[in-house]
Amino acid sequence: MALDHHLRIILKHSLLAALLGVALVACPLRAGASPGIEIKAGFISAPHTQETVSILDVPAADDGIAGAKLAIEDNNTTGSFLGQSFTIEDVPLKPGDDPVAALNKLVAQGIFFVLADVPADSLLALADAAKDKGVLLFNTSAPDDSLREENCRADVFHVAPSYSMLADGLAQYLVWKQWTRWLLIKGSHPQDELYAGALRHAAKKFGAKIVEERVYEDTGGGRRSDSGSVQTQRLIPVATQNAPAYDVLIAADESEVFANYLPFRTWDPRPVAGSAGLEPTSWDGTHEQWGAIQLQNRFMKLAARRMNARDNNAWVAVRMIGEAATRTGSNNPKAIRDYLTGPDFAIAAFKGQKQTLRPWNQQLRQPILLGDGRMIVSVSPQEGFLHQTSELDTLGFDEPETKCKLK
Amino acid sequence: MNAPGKTRIGALAFYVFALSALALFEPAPAKAFTAYISNEKGNSISIIDTDKLEVVKTVPVGHRPRGIALNKDGSELYICAGDDDLIQILDTKKLAVVGTLPSGPDPELLILSPDGKLLYLSNENDNMVTAIDVASRKAVAEIPVGVEPEGMGLSPDGKVLVNTSETTNMAHLIDTQTRKIFANVLVDARPRAAQYTPDGSELWVSSEVGGTVSVIDPANPKVKQKITFQIPGLSKEAIQPVGLRFTPDGKRAFVALGPANRVAVIDAATKKVEKYLLVGQRVWQLAFTPDAKYLYATNGVSNDVSVIDVASLKVVKSIAVGSFPWGVAISPQ
């Protein structure tokens, strides 16, 4: 009897201990909360011009970084179930600041995931400096095709679409509309020629014809004036008169000099596309399909403004890092890199289909939105433009024509 | 095209219906069911007589109605009016909105507890699942979940509530007693629907952007298998699983594939796709008639509902409804 009682107590205790043990082991597993992993990112941004033709386009003080911050919030919500926490260090550059010095500072703080909202030459400098440090760079703004082609780098992921992707997205729609005669007007800056080059390539690729090309010289001066409309009303008709027959005026103006003056002021009554009018972009504040309204609402709550393309590219970049960290349970740059470049990576980013990386140059495949600033008019790829791998690869330079050798 | 003509025909049909109802004195024996379709952009509910296979009435409701659910006796329809941040209660006899339930911001989908006492709903803008006591019309619990909560599923015994979060990419398993998450299961991108098999032995979760259905073992909450889809001539990006339903005998699953414009028929035991049924554009949600003879599928872009004959696996009818049909619920009444 006594023994029996004793045994029962032991049994009870060991059962309790076993239960406790199970509970202790099971709880973290069940809740998925492995002891805290911290994933630290940095955001290096060059100043964007405040000189825009429309005041609606003047960048906010938190341009770009606000998108990254929202994705950090989103990642942290997910991370709360997995014991992962995400942070971002904002490093805005002043004119003349060395981006490489900023990168070195981040690396010294143990930050290996770096978003770069900088021009192409700075991005290349960052990529070369990052090479042996195990840093992963995410290009969130530079559209230069050279960064994805002859100057591609293995440590750079391109979240922003290239000029050729943007131009092809626009061209597909214009060809679908049967507006195939283009009058091309480009600015006098080197970036304008890069965009114009992509538009020429797109015209050839999809069967449109550039009937004439014109250059709009940047003669300097500011954009704000109390009497601006009087002059532009007289200047633009002159700049666009005596053109051969055309369907649509295409502007390549990467420096905010003239494109937004074109609509409604042309000599011939024609629609405008490219840098004004119908603009191809990775994101716009008016995009709401495919659940995008949810992202727009969250962004509005955080930043008290609408999300632009640079904000969205930064959001996607931080979500890519988050997705890789979630799936691998790691903050190790090599593990993150392997996941992003592996076969399982895909990201949902509110554009109606999964987005993946082109393995040959690490460009994010994505639909291109065509917006007029009020509305999304259409989304490319257009129906009927087919491809053997992914219809998204009808946008931009494709694998057979790439000059990229990742190293 | 000629809306006035249509209205006249609609009105005529209604009079004929009313007259015949009067003439019969009593309603016809309960073979016909009533299907309710929420029209996301139409801000209305289309009401379909499943015998006649046509819309008998369209009731205006709140803004952006999506998820809908009936109470146990079919006397009330709960409607997530997302842009109004509330749940509307539609009296299915009067066909009028008779009240509202507090919902928290942007309610999207809801599910009724097996005892009919609680409504669980997902708040898309707020990363919350809210439980509402139907009798007192009060919110009794808020459960924090992942980013953009969406699909809601319940185990057959009502003990486990499952919520999917679209940007977190998880199925959150919630104990309905403690109202706490006890497991999180990572699935493919943008999970939508969560459904238990009728015997409760498996939990299936559709992933819209990932293009897969994850089969989860509820006893040891992990993905044990993934179902993929291949349709000749369609890119893999176009295959986007959304709505998901099991036949009551648990033998077959039907999965709506969004812009692939097809409903996949899956053998629930082997997990093999038996057939793809061509329906309307961007097929969203699915619901069986109470006798499980027909499956209704809402087609978001083509503004119609496809009716599938479950025995023959054929689409037998397309019924034009309101603008951007989204949710569907079918009442035995």
Image (cartoon, rainbow, N blue to C red):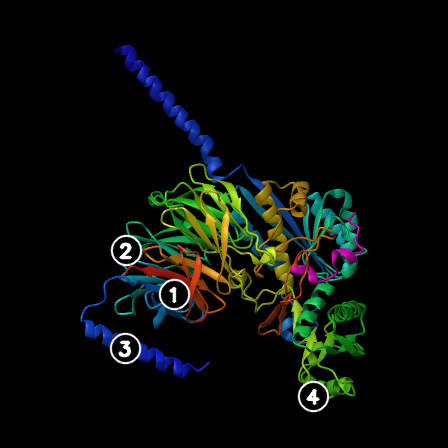
Q: Are marks 2 and 1 on the same chain?
A: yes
What amino acid does circle 1 point to? Answer: Ile
Q: Residues within 10 Å of mark 2 (few under 14, many from 20)?
A: some
Q: Residues within 10 Å of mark 3 (few under 14, many from 20)?
A: few
Q: How far apart are marks 4 and 3 (CA)?
A: 66 Å
Q: Is residue A392 magenta?
A: yes
What amino acid does circle 4 point to? Answer: Val
Helix, strand or loop for disc 3: helix
Mark 2 / mark 1, whichever is N-terminal: 1
| Label 4–label 2 contact, CB within 8 A | no
Q: What is the x, y in percent for residue A346?
A: 61, 51
Q: What stretch is highlighted in magenta?
A: A391-407
Q: What is the x, y in percent for residue A255?
A: 74, 71
What amino acid does circle 2 point to? Answer: Lys
Q: Nearer the viewer, mark 4 or mark 2?
A: 2
**Label at residue B37:** 1
Residue occupied by mark 3: B16
Residue occupied by mark 4: A230
Q: What is the x, y in percent for residue B282?
A: 51, 63
| Label 3–label 1 contact, CB within 8 A | no
Q: Is residue B67 visible?
A: no
Mark 2 / mark 3, whichever is N-terminal: 3
- In the picture, measured across the screen, residue B195 lies left or right of residue B75, that is right
Helix, strand or loop for disc 2: loop
Residue occupied by mark 2: B72
| Label 4–label 3 contact, CB within 8 A | no
Chain letter of disc 4 in the image: A
